[in-house]
Image (cartoon, rainbow, N blue to C red):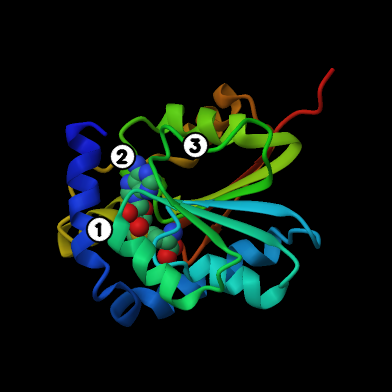
Amino acid sequence: MDALEDRSREQFEAWAQWFDRRLGWSFSHTNRHLLRLVDPSPGSRVLDVGSGTGILLQQMNERDTGLRLFGVDIAHQMLTAARAKLPDRVALHQGSANSLPYSSDAFDYVTCTASFHHYRDPPGALHEMHRVLRPCGRVAVLDPFTDGVLRRLVCGALEFTFRERDTALFTSEEMRDLFQRAGFVNVSQSSYLHYKLLTLGSKPAPT
Ligand SMILES: C[S@@+](CC[C@H](N)C(=O)[O-])C[C@H]1O[C@@H](n2cnc3c(N)ncnc32)[C@H](O)[C@@H]1O
């Protein structure tokens, strides 16, 4: 873990004690947009990167108890909060999005919500998501984006309110480009609540 990741981890260790109380409703609301477009088939292996207190994992588990769910997060306390509300069969691991502790081709879906802008090496994190996905697997990243003045103002206000440092936010075009450079195909995007962007992609089938 480098200094930047260490700072991010420290921030979220502290946030864990109030995260669900203050922000749980808002994150579960935006996650529903992702779940409308990403509907893992029964038995799928799904990895949530930056899984935090497990809000999305819990929502997926409630929809389909047959999913094989995994979460990885850099902050131990966020994982502890997730562990307290998820069944034991949901596997949780501490680790960095830039060095995922999983073998290649291991998952049918990789999701990532409200976490991508904290990564020290965003292209590297997308390469890791690509590596752990099986061919034809799907990736979904939901994060604020900065197209236009209004969205930049909203993002600036959020960063100020939550005293976020070291974040990297992108335009929709930059995100699309990052996805394509990481090797994803069939990239599509939709915005939600004006300032959140869902970018979807697939790992190509072997040739
Ligand atoms: C705003 S929270 C969102 C949590 C969750 N995805 C949700 O939507 O409720 C961001 C999460 O990303 C995690 N995170 C930040 N940097 C990370 C990294 N480099 N690798 C893995 N997780 C990271 C934080 O610990 C935190 O739990």
- How far across and how far down the image is residue 40, in percent? 74, 58
Sequence order check, earlier mark of 2 and 1 = 1
The answer to whether one can see residue 146 in this image is no
Give the position of the C terminus as an image quadrant: top right
Query: Which residue, given by chain and number where applicable, does mark 1 sit on?
Result: 12
- Residue ranking furthest to the front: 88
Q: Is mark 1 on a helix, strand or loop?
A: helix
User: Residue 52: in sight, yes or no?
Assistant: yes
Q: Which of 185 and 4 lies nearest the eye of the viewer?
A: 4
Q: In the drawing, what numbered circle is on residue 168?
A: 2
Residue nearest the observer in this picture, 52 or 103: 103
Which class describes the residues within 10 Å of circle 3: few (<14), some (14-19), or many (20+)?
many
Sequence-first disc among 1 and 3: 1
Residue 29: x %, y % from top left: 50, 75
Task: Pick the quarter of the image with the N terminus.
Answer: top left
Q: Please give the name of the residue rendered at 19% of the width and 55% of the height, measured from the top-left corner.
A: 11
The vertical placement of 15 against 135, above or below, is: below
The answer to whether residue 206 is left or right of residue 38 is: right
Q: Quadrant of residue 57?
A: bottom right
Residue occupying image coordinates x 57% and y 55%: 70
Q: Report the Cα–Cα distance between label 1 and label 3.
A: 24 Å
